[in-house]
Image (cartoon, rainbow, N blue to C red):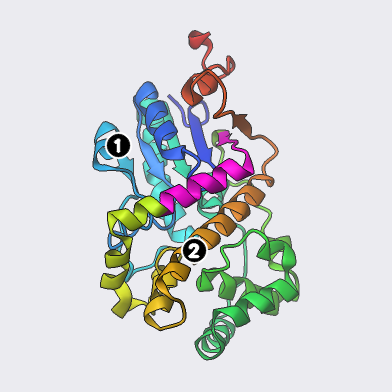
Amino acid sequence: MSISKSKVFVIQGPTASGKTALAIDLARKLQTEVISADSRQFYREMSIGTAIPTELELSQVKHHFIHSHSIHSELSASQYATEAKPILDHLLLEKGSAVIVGGSGMFIDALTLGLDEIPHDKEIQSKWNALFDKEGLLFLQNELLRLDPAYYSIVDTMNSVRLIRALEVIEITGKPFSTLRKGAVKNDYNIHRFGITWKRSDLYERIDQRVNLMIEAGLFDEAKSLFHQRKLRALNTVGYSEFFHYWDNEFDFDEAIEKIKQHTRNYAKRQLTWLKRYEQLTELNPYADRSLLDQLLNHSDLFPDEN
């Protein structure tokens, strides 16, 4: 089957919405494989705080980009697209479909739509890196909010690498980073995009429950084992940085946990904002009598034999 006729199913949206289970169910139905697009699950040193699929889930269908890299070699969106594209193309040719799942919209777009032509200047990047080392994350956040509130509303504001990249481009071009990121289509994939639509209050409750389960599963000890490497940018992420602040005597223990929940809810809000970029996104209803998979399969134009 040709790549243009094969189908790319993207299960996308906020954390704790149920994407992993749906992606596995769909991949099993289609007899294909899952490509993860969760930029935190790439790293083998992090498991509990990134909510990687369980061993049982991983055994049900082959996954790509789960614990595939190290925190010592951070994976950018462009590098991810370069590495994932041959896998995606192979699946489309050999199996006729592929399932991409994750909440990292920038990585999904880099793989499925192609990369924008955005300039880079090492000296300017170094300047912003030095400012970050001197002034801290809050300084970068305030600068980006001032210069490009549109991008600030969707970026992971805890990720210094993305903040620095945006500020670098703004300085080079004199234009907001958001105006340069139009996702110009360069890849000719037959994309079908799905999201799971929870009431905001219910989604936030699911997030809080997930964080509680992470704490019970040993997130505190996992973060502690990485504390000596906390300067690595891959570790500047929700679930870990809050405990790093705790050990730096900036939070007490209970406050660190509340910060994890708050920052995760903030991240989910940005993920929901990102979904508004897409003209075609099919919403699946988790409150319906039919399962999420049945709802997805009910689209007669995609699965004429299922109806």
Image coords of residue 193 (percent x, y): 57, 35
Image coords of residue 120 (percent x, y): 58, 74
- Residue 216: quarter of image: bottom left
Residue at image position (43%, 24%) is 1
Helix, strand or loop at label 1? It is helix
- The amino acid at mark 2 is Glu
Of tags 2 and 1, the one toward the viewer is 2
Residue at image position (32%, 41%) is 63
Return the residue nearer the eye: 95 or 162. Answer: 162
The residue beneath circle 1 is 57
Image coords of residue 213 (percent x, y): 36, 50
Image: 214 above or below 226 = above
What's drawn in magenta, residue-wise?
193-211
Helix, strand or loop at label 2? It is helix
Q: Is residue 60 magenta?
A: no
User: In this orientation, does residue 121 appear?
Assistant: yes
Q: Is residue 199 magenta?
A: yes
Q: Main secondary structure of the magenta part?
A: helix
Q: Residues within 10 Å of mark 1 (few under 14, many from 20)?
A: some
